[in-house]
Amino acid sequence: MIFDEAYSGKVFIMSRASYDDAQAVIYGMPMDYTVSFRPGSRFGPGRIREASIGLEEYSPYMDRHLEEVRYHDAGDILFPFGNAAKSLDLIEGYIDQLLKDGKFPIGLGGEHLVTWPIIKAFHKVYPDLVLIHIDAHADLREEYEGETLSHSTPVRKACNLMGAENVYSFGIRSGMREEFEFAKTSGMTMEKFEVAEPLKKHLPKLAGRPVYVTIDIDVLDPAHAPGTGTAEAGGITSKELLEAIQLIAHSDVKVVGADLVEVAPPYDSGEQTSIAASKFVREYLLGFVK
């Protein structure tokens, strides 16, 4: 796997030098080729890393310190610019290798389409995989203006692969009428507008199951995260998203991997989106990596 040397000097705070000794591996996916509104999330992984330098290494939410988790920041996957299909293949191949090596993958996007090849790789290892999807958008389209590879399609693709009954979406407040109709009739679970309270209801049902967590930063209200490509008014607070991560971490599900996508620094004048995202990644490390 080829990584972008431009990011070799930017690593998430307290990243260890050794891949071999790491429990978890952070990797970047700087792709925003299919976005339908504002591009720029290709710069998200680098800015999340830079913002992490301002974090405290101790989390009062998890009562753990980053020194308690061995993780390695591998940098960004080097993509053939503009070639979405090839880029997705590279992601899938990389996750295949991480799972073969027994690592806990934490991905930084990039647009939300990058989650699709990750799910494909995980499903090979965990055929009973559950997807927890936290987002403003349903992402249930089959195509967008004729393109099946689109950031509006990954959750629909996941439903088709995993079985819709294994897909749980939270915080959804935007999508086509047809997407909401699909959610009602397919057997998937979609909770609109809120995240933490419905998680409390559903997590006990998933006890013991392998779970992959994907969070689109635009689940937050633009007041909390303006730096994203398709901001949607009416979102949750950063406090609620931190609570949601805690609920998952302290539940009886087996989190096997996670990603955080759609941070777009060009629209983040106060850097609050990158700063919030870096904190969420810290909580992933301390809450999900056992």
Image (cartoon, rainbow, N blue to C red):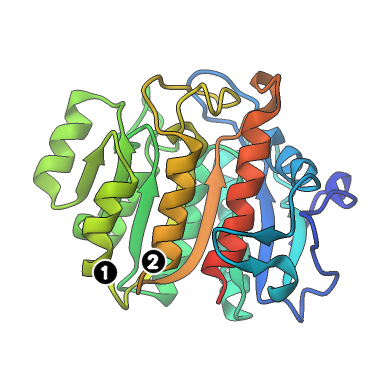
Q: Is residue 203 above or below residue 9?
A: below
User: Which residue is disc 1 drawn over?
Assistant: 206
What is the distance, in whole Å, between disc 1 and disc 2 at their CAs? Answer: 8 Å
In front of the other: 145 or 247: 247
The image quadrant where one finds the N terminus is bottom right
Could you tell whether 77 is left or right of 231 in the image? right
Q: Position of residue 220 (x, y in %)?
A: 46, 32
Number of numbered markers: 2
Residue at image point 70% right, 22% down: 270
Q: Position of residue 165 (x, y in %)?
A: 19, 58
Quarter-wise, where is residue 137 in the image?
Answer: top left
Query: Dot 1: what SS?
Result: helix
Check the image and report above or below for 36 versus 187: above
> Counting other residues with Cα less than 10 Å from the Cα at mark 1, is it few (<14), some (14-19), or many (20 or more)?
some
Identify which residue is drawn at 24% across, 68% down: 204
- Image depth: mark 1 or mark 2 in front: 1
Q: Residues within 10 Å of mark 2 (few under 14, many from 20)?
A: many
Residue furthest out toward the right:
9
Viewer-proximal residue among 49 and 20 = 49
Q: Amino acid at mark 1?
A: Leu
Amino acid type at image mark 2: Val
Question: Which is more toward the observer, 276 or 87?
Answer: 276
Identify the secondary structure beneath mark 2: strand
| Mark identifier at residue 93 | none
Which residue in the protein does label 2 denote?
A: 211
Residue 156 visible here: no
Which residue is located at x 90 percent, y 50 percent? 9
Residue 137 in view: yes
Q: Nearer the viewer, residue 58 or 270?
A: 58
Quarter of the C terminus within the rendering: bottom right
